[in-house]
Amino acid sequence: MSISSIGMESTGYRVFSGGIWEEKYGYARAVVAGGRVIVSGCTATVDGEVRHVGDPHRQALTAIEIALEAVLMGGLTREDVVMVRYYVVEQRHFDPVGKAIHAVFAKVRPACTGVRVAGLVDPRMLVEIEIEALRT
């Protein structure tokens, strides 16, 4: 991942992972503003390839790992995470994804929202996860 300044007059910056979707669609992996790190939706895409096809639990763990790397680049930690949002494409994926979130955040207990969607940018993607962290 890399970091880019927003501008001299701003206190924030952007974190880039080099992922194909960031460049293609013109967004940053995360935006750091003040004491907040806001991470864009992360999937199990690593080096341009979707990992763990067919396994929502492992895809969720990979997406969380990618998101937490951006949180760390923004100067915060897992313990600073205050919000997790996740999107699944099938009803039956709520439980495996929820178990992945529990495995990572059970001691932190951030707020969390799960939403079922019609699909993600690649049909092999089963889950997308957003994270927000806050320096308290």
Image (spheres, rainbow, N blue to C red):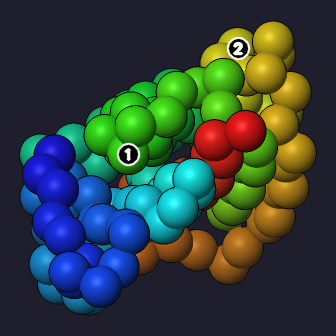
Please tell me which residue lies in front, 75 or 103.
75
Q: Position of residue 95 (x, y in %)?
A: 84, 33
| Residue in view at x 17 percent, y 56 percent | 3
Q: Which mark is residue 17?
A: none
Name which residue type carries label 1. Answer: Gly
Crowd rating for badge 1 (residues with CA inside 10 Å; few <14, some 14–19, many 20+): many
| Residue in view at x 41 percent, y 75 percent | 121
Name which residue type carries label 2. Answer: Ala
Residue that badge 2 annotates = 103
Does residue 19 lie above or below 64 as drawn?
below
- Report, in whole angstroms, how far the alpha carbon at label 1 lies from the one at label 2: 22 Å
Relative to residue 106, is residue 133 drawn left or right? left
Crowd rating for badge 2 (residues with CA inside 10 Å; few <14, some 14–19, many 20+): few
Relative to residue 125, is residue 50 drawn left or right? left
| Residue in view at x 30 percent, y 66 percent | 13
Give the secondary structure at mark 1: loop
Relative to residue 68, is residue 128 drawn left or right? right
In the image, which is nearer the foreground, mark 1 or mark 2?
Answer: 1
| Residue in view at x 66 percent, y 23 percent | 79
Q: Which mark is residue 74?
A: 1
Q: Position of residue 45 (x, y in %)?
A: 29, 48
- In this rendering, the count of numbered labels is 2
Please tell me which residue lies in front, 56 or 128.
128
Q: Quadrant of the C terminus?
A: top right
Please tell me which residue lies in front, 118 or 80.
80
